[in-house]
Amino acid sequence: MSQFALDQQNQVATTQQQSPKDRIRRLVWKMAIATLILMAIGSATRVMNAGLACPDWPLCYGELVPTKQMNFQVFLEWFHRLDASLIGFSAIFLVGTSWWNRESLPKWLPWASTFALFLIVFQGILGGLTVTQLLRFDIVTAHLGTALFFFITLLVIGTALTPYKATGQAGNLPGISFTATVLVYLQSLIGALVGSRWALHQCFGGDQLCTVMYTHIFGLIPPTLAILALVFVSRRTVALHPILRKLANYAGVLLILQLLLGFATFRLHLQVEPLTVTHQLIGASLLGVLVAFTVFAIRDWIDTRSISGYNQEFNSSATSEVSS
């Protein structure tokens, strides 16, 4: 009993010793995981035709918890809104904490937190319009696009706050990873458009919207080549930071898995809902890995240039002193 009490006291002391930067970093990573789960639930809501299971907004059948109307579809839409609300309150807390402790934090952090809050508010507005406008495809696509951009913003903040010691071996990897990230994000938007317009069903059913579907299919070529280049260059780079090497390997594995899931989804005509949800979940995870790699690689590049500039300045000063 006494040992348990001592352990609890140690945990409290450790928490009190954590800096605001550490607490914010942990909060941001938790929000990022919750956002990934939120996107998976949103995908399940769409493929299960539950997007209008709650006909009103922001309540559901005029209640916070529609116990009388509750079924699986209503639960999906209701839980999707609940998760989004929790993330929204977390974003408000993040902004308040960042500005309150701004003297001991990087100058960019309060502004980045405020931008994240703006995105989640805008995302909430789009969520309401998705219901009131009866799942209009452009609003549904923008809804997912904003969610992905909010996810990216959280990952940039969390990765930038994570301790990292540069090795100076990043080379051209920041540019390659940034290109891959942009291409995967654009491919995700096209995938959202395919889903929101049910392009696969309409193309196979009546030769409609085939252009949209084939744009998504052939659009996978540029991001695939960019990710393969990233993996190849990372494996060929000597003394690359272990974090970057692991992230590059993760990106390669997720790419293969995503291609297999996409092929299976296409062949099965989106008839297996868990497969479709997993396809979007892996795509978002791949995007997240690329974002983290890009931020770490840029930090490596910046830190290396800073150290190099300092050394040049120091050598110049030393040379001047010797000459005098």
Image (cartoon, rainbow, N blue to C red):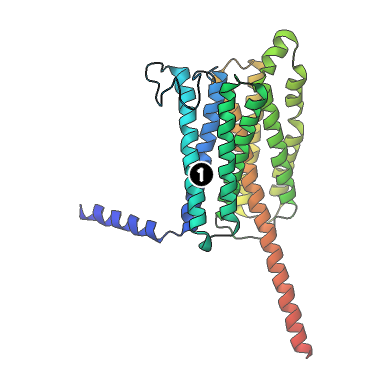
Q: Is residue 172 left or right of residue 60?
A: right
Viewer-side residue, 228 vs 192: 192
Instruction: Classify residue 18 by image quadrant.
Output: bottom left
Q: Which residue is mark 1?
A: 91
Q: Secondary structure at mark 1?
A: helix
- Residue plotted at (50% across, 18% down): 53
**Residue 220 position in % (x across, y down):** 73, 30
**Residue 192 position in % (x across, y down):** 66, 27
Q: Is residue 35 visible?
A: yes
**Residue 253 position in % (x across, y down):** 62, 37
Residue placed furthest toward the left: 1
- Residue plotted at (47% across, 43% down): 90
- Residue plotted at (65% across, 30% down): 142
Q: Is residue 97 above or below residue 129?
A: below
Q: Is residue 49 left or right of residue 226?
A: left
Q: Is residue 57 above or below residue 271?
A: below
Q: Is residue 260 visible?
A: no
Q: Is residue 65 above or below residue 5?
A: above
Viewer-side residue, 68 vs 153: 68
Instruction: Classify residue 178 by image quadrant.
Output: top right
* Three-letter residue code for mark 1: Ala
- Quadrant of the snapshot with the C terminus: bottom right
Residue placed furthest toward the top: 206
Few, some or many residues within 10 Å of mark 1 (<14, 14–19, 20+): many
**Residue 69 position in % (x across, y down):** 41, 16
Instruction: Classify residue 306 by image quadrant.
Output: bottom right
Viewer-side residue, 284 vs 81: 81
Q: Is residue 135 left or right of residue 304?
A: left
